Image (cartoon, rainbow, N blue to C red):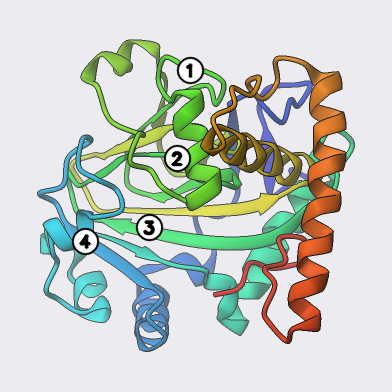
Amino acid sequence: MAESLVEFRETPFDPWKIAAVSHRLRDHPLLQLEALVELGRRLEARRLVRTHSDAATAGSSFADAPKLHPNRRGAADTLASIADAHAWMSLLNVQADPLYRTLVDEVLDAVRPLVEPHDPGMCFRAGWIFVSSPGAVTPFHIDHEHNVILQVAGRKRLYTWDPLDRAVVSERAQELFHERHSRELVTWDDAFRARARVFELEPGQGGYMPSTSPHMVENGDAPSITVSFTYYTDATRRRQLLYRGNARMRALGLSPRPVGESPARDRTKARLLQGLQDAKSGLRRLAGRGVRDDGQAYAPA
């Protein structure tokens, strides 16, 4: 049997467990530096580039790093000279580029049969390409999506934490993140290193991180190219709904049970919250107002 484009190295697959991954993308023409320089030009024109200097640390605010540690160079210039640019750069939502949407589909279509039996409803598909100078750091943070992160060039150390480890990210921090996309309570402590699962990534290797898995990355001594393919599922959307509901209950002075403590209560609460959300969305549509649809095939840019 031919080797799959992406393989999970730990079986059976558990959507809420961090896992090692291998892949065959290191020589993909769309992930070579010359192609990424051109992509950077196109995405920068659409404001789909995020960058900061290599002065950022694990404890830097992920949201504020571009402002606190600015990289003054443009995308094409930074990418073309990444070995000496002292910069970290992310090309955002590459599925917005027609050429790179084919790459997102190629990879996630290969992943989908592996995850669908355990975690159905893949949607909100997206791709992110990270190009970083030697020694650059991705600050500690969490994201909404399930994430398949693949190393294409260079080496880096990926620190990951269990998404349910409340000693690293508290229940209240999860509520604020899901309700307001705020990471203000997602803060770094060097003691977290002892609780992490660490991947020493080389080209052809990667990791799977469930939704809201805390993570931090330290680049090696050479330029690095890494690509992430992300998606939502029925479970991630339901979990986000529950955390938003708990955040609103807490704002009313109530003390909701933590998500996951009682699966039966979570199911009942999710049905009620979904009904309320559907009704609210219906009213917004009647009023001619926009409604965010987390169930669409691709994440909007």
Q: Position of residue 132 (x, y in %)?
A: 26, 55
Give the mark nearest the N terminus, 3 or 1: 3
For the point 60% across and 49% down, the residue is: 24
Q: Amino acid at mark 1?
A: Arg
Give the mark nearest the N terminus, 2 or 3: 3
Query: In the shown orientation, is residue 138 left or right of residue 260?
Result: left
Q: Which residue is mark 4?
A: 66
Q: Nearer the viewer, mark 2 or mark 3?
A: 2
Q: Quadrant of residue 268?
A: top right
Give the mark nearest the N terminus, 4 or 1: 4
Q: Which residue is mark 2?
A: 142
For the point 77% across and 56% down, the residue is: 277
Q: Which residue is mark 3?
A: 130
Q: Amino acid at mark 4?
A: Pro
Mark 1 Cα-neighbour bin, 10 Å: few <14, some 14–19, many ≥20: few
Q: Which residue is mark 1?
A: 166
Query: In the shown orientation, is residue 257 left or right of residue 220?
Result: right
